[in-house]
Image: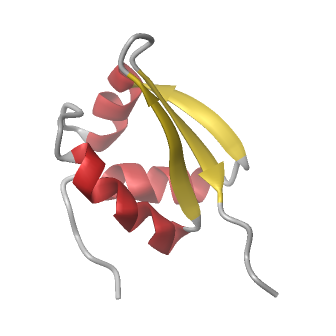
Amino acid sequence: MIIMSKYNPLWKWINKNKTDDFKLTFAEIENIAGVPIDHSFLTFKKELLQYGFKVVKISMKEQTVDFEKVEEEA
């Protein structure tokens, strides 16, 4: 079941991107999602697993988020 959140446009973009590991800046995330990244991102990021990705690292200093493709279990 896909849950809709304010970050859904971001999850869909990541799903279409199909890159294994990548990094986005907070500004890029805001541009893609149409909303600024805020503390709620920590709660909503678990939705990303439904799309086959996970958040590996959030850097407040660099203002970036590292994403990684989740390996599918055989």
Q: Residue at x 20, y 62 (%)?
A: 5
Q: Nearer the viewer, residue 3 or 46?
A: 46
Q: Does residue 69 appear left or right of residue 66 in this picture? A: right
Question: What color scheme is it?
Answer: secondary structure
Pinpoint residue 35: horizontal percent, then vertical percent.
Answer: 18, 37
Q: Residue at the spot x=50%, y=29% of the render? A: 24
| Closer-to-camera residue (63/4) | 63
> Which quadrant of the figure has residue 56?
top right
- The residue drawn where x is 18% and y is 34% is 38
Where is residue 43 drawn, in percent x and y?
24, 55
Question: In the image, is residue 54 above or below residue 33?
Answer: below
How far from the left and from the top, in percent, is residue 42?
28, 47
Horizontal arrangement in the rendering, residue 64 relative to residue 69 (left or right):
left
Location of the N terminus by quadrant is: bottom left
Residue 4 picture quarter: bottom left
The reply to whether residue 7 is in sight is no
Q: Please indicate, yes or no, whether residue 17 appears anywhere in the rendered image.
A: yes
List x then y, in percent, for residue 73: 75, 82
How many labels were placed on the picture?
Answer: 0
Task: Judge by depth and name the residue closer to the eye, 36 or 34.
Answer: 36
In the rendered image, the residue lying farthest to the right is: 74
Q: Vertical placement of 63 versus 57: above or below? A: above
Residue at the top extreme? 61
Q: Quadrant of residue 30?
A: top left
Q: Is residue 58 above or below residue 69?
A: above
Q: Is residue 2 left or right of residue 19?
A: left
Quarter of the picture holding the C terminus? bottom right
**Residue plotted at (73% across, 49% down):** 20
